[in-house]
Image (spheres, helix red, strand yellow):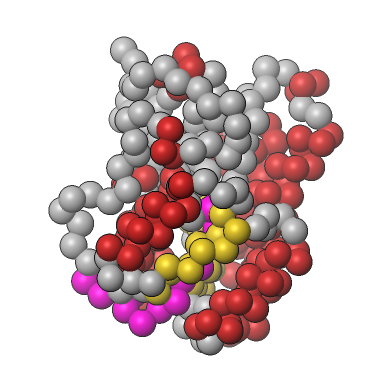
Amino acid sequence: MSQRPPQHQEHQPGRQSEMHPHPEVIREGYKGSGKLAGKVALITGGDSGIGRSVAVHFAREGATVAISYLEEDQDAAQTSALVEQEGASCFLYRGDMGDPDNCRRLAEDMVSRFGRIDVLVNNAAEQHGVNALEEVTVEEWNRTFQTNIHAYFYLTHACLPDMPRGSAIINTTSVNAYKGHKHLVAYASTKGAIVAFTRSIALTLADRNIRVNGVAPGPVWTPLIPSSMDADEVAEFGSQVPMGRAAQPSEIAPSYVFLASDDASYFTGQVLHPNGGYIVNA
């Protein structure tokens, strides 16, 4: 049985505005309780998917929100409007985080506007499916690493001087870092690198009281899916997990709220696994 109507988008990154049904950004009954009141948060890939959901959840919890995004379309503006509906401000920055100069400029803009960065969410990603290893081109391999892991280092490096004690860094990895994926070799490889990056810098930054953790979602209904899979794959996406369905972004974002909040004050170097029932060696 299909999980959703077959659909495909030719362009990556995909557009949330063109998905049907639209992903759920935040559950109607989600109640904020000021967990992030007074914090300044920066979220990459915040225009859609998990990033949009995290931005709106953070806003409902009282944070000031900034998002980076790659291309101009209505998705970033819609995220900004949703954040502002929560009574929070939303700073938009357009740029490729795979370019270290863009990361430096974004960090400088954040400090100029807000004076500091309390929460950094490295989230932007791309993926490209293949049927055989020989189909992975050198250009595609390098670009996937540039977006999915190099950018995490570039932006973290740029932001760290202005992250005070008690700050939090949250990196989006994937269940595929732990179980692999025969059609997403480059993507899964970068997600494994993100786990090692998370654990390593958690050790490096522990004496500065900056916590570093990750979230490893299973299948999630985001624009990355119709923009990187064919229509038939999209229709069945998520059916393979024990729970039998893909998650909504609204089911993933609360993990980021927890890790960004003081409730996670003794968490560092850890990865949360909202993945629909996969058992992984965490």
Vertical placement of 275 versus 244: above or below? below
| Residue 181 seen in this snapshot | no
x, y percentage for residue 61?
A: 29, 69
Q: Residue at x 42, y 17 (%)?
A: 6
38 drawn magenta = yes
Q: Residue at x 40, y 27 (%)?
A: 238
Instruction: Tell me which segment is drawn in magenta.
Output: 33-45
For this view, does 202 lie left or right of residue 33? right
Q: Nearer the viewer, residue 4 or 174?
A: 4
Q: Quadrant of the N terminus?
A: top left
Q: Nearer the viewer, residue 256 or 242?
A: 256
x, y percentage for residue 97?
A: 67, 58
Taking the view exactly as shown, the residue that stands out farthest to the left is 29
Q: Residue at x 50, y 83 (%)?
A: 114
9 drawn magenta = no
Q: Residue at x 65, y 31 (%)?
A: 128
| Residue 190 seen in this snapshot | yes
- Quadrant housing residue 279: top left
Vertical placement of 224 versus 252: above or below? above
Taking the view exactly as shown, the residue that stands out farthest to the right is 138
Vertical placement of 195 versus 177: above or below? below
x, y percentage for residue 2?
A: 34, 16
x, y percentage for residue 253?
A: 37, 54
Q: Nearer the viewer, residue 96 or 140?
A: 96
